[in-house]
Image: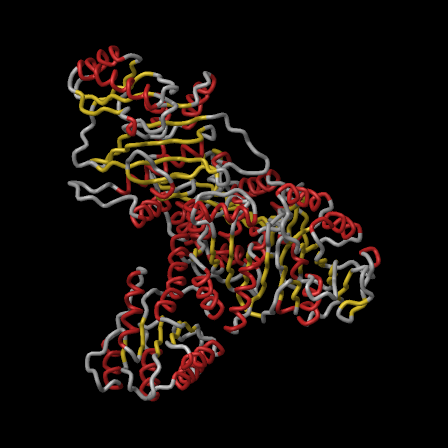
Amino acid sequence: MSVKRISQFFNPKSIAVVGASNNASRPGYIVMRNLLQGGFNGPIMPVTPKYNAVHGVLAYPDIASLPQTPDIAIICTNKSTILPLITALAEQGCKNIIVIAAGLSEQQKDALSSHCKTHKVNLLGPNCLGLMIPHLGVNASFSHTVTRPGKVAFISQSAAVCSTILDWAQHKDIGFSYFISVGDCVDIDFGELLDFLGRDSKTKAVLLYIDNLKDIRGFISAARAAAFSKPVIVIKTGRTEAGAKAAHAHTGGASSSDAVYDALIQRAGMLRVNDLRELFAATQTLALHPKLLKVEPLCILTNGGGPAVMAVDSLVQSSGKLCELSEHTLTALNHVIPQSDSTDNPVDIFGDSAPERYQKALKILLNAPEVENLLIIHTPSALAPSTEYARIIVDTLSKIDARKRPFVMTNFMGEEAAYEARKICAQGGIPTYRTPEGAVGAYMHLINYRRNQKHLTQTPESIVDELNIDHKAAQATIAAHLSRKENYLSTHQAAPILAHYGIETVTTYIATTPSEAAEVAAECGFPVVLKLISPDIASKSEVGGVVLNLSDEHEVEQAAFAILLRINKVYPDARIDGFSIQPMAPRAGAHELRIAIKTDPQFGPVILLGEAGSALDYSQAAVALPPLNMNLAKYLIANAQDKGVLKERTLPEKVDKYRLCALLTRVSQLIVDQPDISSLELNPLLATQGQFLVLDACIEITPYQRLSHRKRLAIRPYPKEWEKTITLKDGTHALLRPIRPEDEQAHKKFDESLSKEDRYSRFFGEMPQFTHDQLAKMTQIDYDREMAFIVSKKVDGEDVTLGVSRVLMDPDNLVAEFAIVVGSNQQGLGLGRILMNAAIDYCQRQGVSSIEGMTLFENSGMIELARKLGFTIKRDFEEGTIHMSKALN
């Protein structure tokens, strides 16, 4: 990600339009008109050999004739002229280019991408509408309309969707901080833009319209960082196979299962909406209320019972909940509403209520401490004009401190009578909707975003069975199979690999012929299961390749011959490696599950969880991206239940979800550790009496080829390679390692143990103890863009943190900021040098140009350590701080 390289795109001082035109049917005409009407203060320079002036502005015959280098150039010519024009612009020093042209082939896009890299040019497009920066008056787009400044940024791959959103937003008086059409994303993509917008103070929320992504790892890293600070809402096309093909035809790129995209969006803490209607509602809500809701329950005030019931149904069906009103609030409302002495939520003031009664009820609810979120519904009435009620709502809310009042949204039902009322509310900064369901749907967007954020900051449980993992032994076993060119491992071959990760497999015996199968079964003991072994048949049970409950040798031999006859008819060319014989596992009262690993061409390995069966595709499973911890595994199980692919059964014993979480984390670790595994199936996985037993397993392996353009995993896993045992000055041993999400409680205790003086030196002032959310952000880090090292040791069986160092890289990977804190009772042990060297080492390996940090004058120990390690020390006497910096690469 690079914020620095694209920053000039969003703060241009001059703009050139290449292919400017006086022909109203040409893009160059529209772009020039939009720039001139937008109010941009800098030079606008049309480039065209056809006209002396365009829209009354002096034109230049070619790029070489421009009087100055433009900060942005917009190419409005046809696709065949793009490459030479980029060359000419680059020669003039122009680094930021927008290409409007559409219809480029994949080969032409590749050539354009290479051309941009060669000439070090930043390109937006092609196949895009352009760029709008309303607060600067920049409308560098091929748009039919303009937009006004606002708090929401919008990024879209579809120019048509951009036009639709602009048209709707103008009607609703909604503005944007930035409006960016990225088109085919040949160069600048979503990840870079999210990095920029995530740090932009003018942007309070971000909306994305995505067809396909190219840099998955870069996107999820940037999205997670942005979503931690502001709402990011996504509409992702291609939910169906046909839709995915259409999206590929539209903007190119590889296509992946929609379920995998769903997992990515959830994992990054973003919120997904399904269609443009929901996107419109989300845009309106976020434009007027971009903050995270404090609580979930909703209170409803209405003058009509029917619409309120519709709202309640919609709320409950969407897993929302109503607010419970206090006795004090109910008593006050009963005094205001004479028709009722049993008011409840929804609060119905009836259709004949005068505006004064409405206002009194509204004030009571606005001042009720239990009401944090309020939906006001109004139906047209001769006694209750919509516009008058709208003015009452806006006036009443304007008299309450915005920081103290509840989140309020309105629903004025009807069309002609309600239009002006909705406009009054929107102008007053209150989200307003046409239907109760629309209002509740928009509200649930905020709730679901809140839930995603809470999920992001939950502290995962630690698992105690990490010692069951021996990744080196598993790696050696896989290497041995590869050396023998064995790429398909059936149950008996997969079992030792699984055992190295604490995954138990039923005892399996092998036979090559029917008669041998009968002999082996006799030694095994009856009853047995007979299964065909064939790398060419994915689902043996579908073709009769699995026979259960065989009770003697004769049955086994006959069943084996019958299997061979069936396979010969259905799969005559299939390779037959023999038969496996297993003791019949007791299935009564057990729940049969299936866990699979599949390798997606874009995302790499993904984990699927569902019921045991003959097939497990993405539609029949819940999907997650590795690596998993206990919390993420718990979320995967909940998703599987919500999706209906993991059913709650009436069994003597429920599935032990804690142990299932632990099992899923071990499967995740297996796929993280072993890149040669391309797919894995545990099916069925028998869950009974708190234990899990794999009855059938298959693993496909192939030598992993590292690709320079794509990382294997969509999310960088815990970097175990940085773990190191160290010796302190007192002779004791400790562990230096990267921080993990499970360290939150230890980190909290470490923070609480710091003296007042150490906290002051670390934070340059008095600081309260960290909250859970703050600690979660410190421990649940993105290893792709930051690192925190801790030194810990076991004390009475518990991990105790002795010191911490942190480095945070800027998106351009140029500068890393470091910070170090050592426990107040752990100083003098050499921890500062150990932690500082770890930070320097890490930054050097990451290719960071320099590392720097700040401290106070009185922190002499840190200053002296930095000097010894080769840092340049600079004093800022005005601020009373020391700046430390060291060049690395």
User: Can you give x and y, in whole percent of width and height, for residue 590 in the image?
Assistant: 20, 36
From where the camera sits, is residue 823 visible?
no
- The residue at the point 23 percent across, 13 percent down is 520
**Residue 4 position (above or below residue 720):** below
User: Can you give x and y, in whole percent of width and height, for residue 814 in the image?
Assistant: 64, 47
Q: Nearer the viewer, residue 749 or 303?
A: 303
**Residue 315 position (above or below residue 680):** below
Residue 774, image quadrant? bottom left
What's the coloring here? secondary structure
Question: Which image quarter is the C terminus in?
Answer: top right
Position of residue 7 in the picture relative to residue 393 (left or right):
right
Position of residue 788 in the picture relative to residue 500 (left or right):
right
Residue 610, image quadrant? top left
Residue 445, image quadrant? bottom left
**Residue 719 position (above or below residue 705):** below
* Count of all numbered marks drawn on residues in the image: 0
User: Can you give x and y, in whole percent of width and height, for residue 207 in the image?
Assistant: 50, 60
- The residue at the point 42 percent across, 33 percent down is 671
Position of residue 818 in the picture relative to residue 99 (left or right):
left
- The residue at the point 43 percent across, 22 percent down is 487
Q: Nearer the viewer, residue 845 or 502?
A: 502
From where the camera sits, is residue 802 visible?
yes
User: Can you give x and y, in whole percent of width and height, for residue 119 in the image?
Assistant: 74, 46
Q: Nearer the viewer, residue 754 or 630?
A: 630
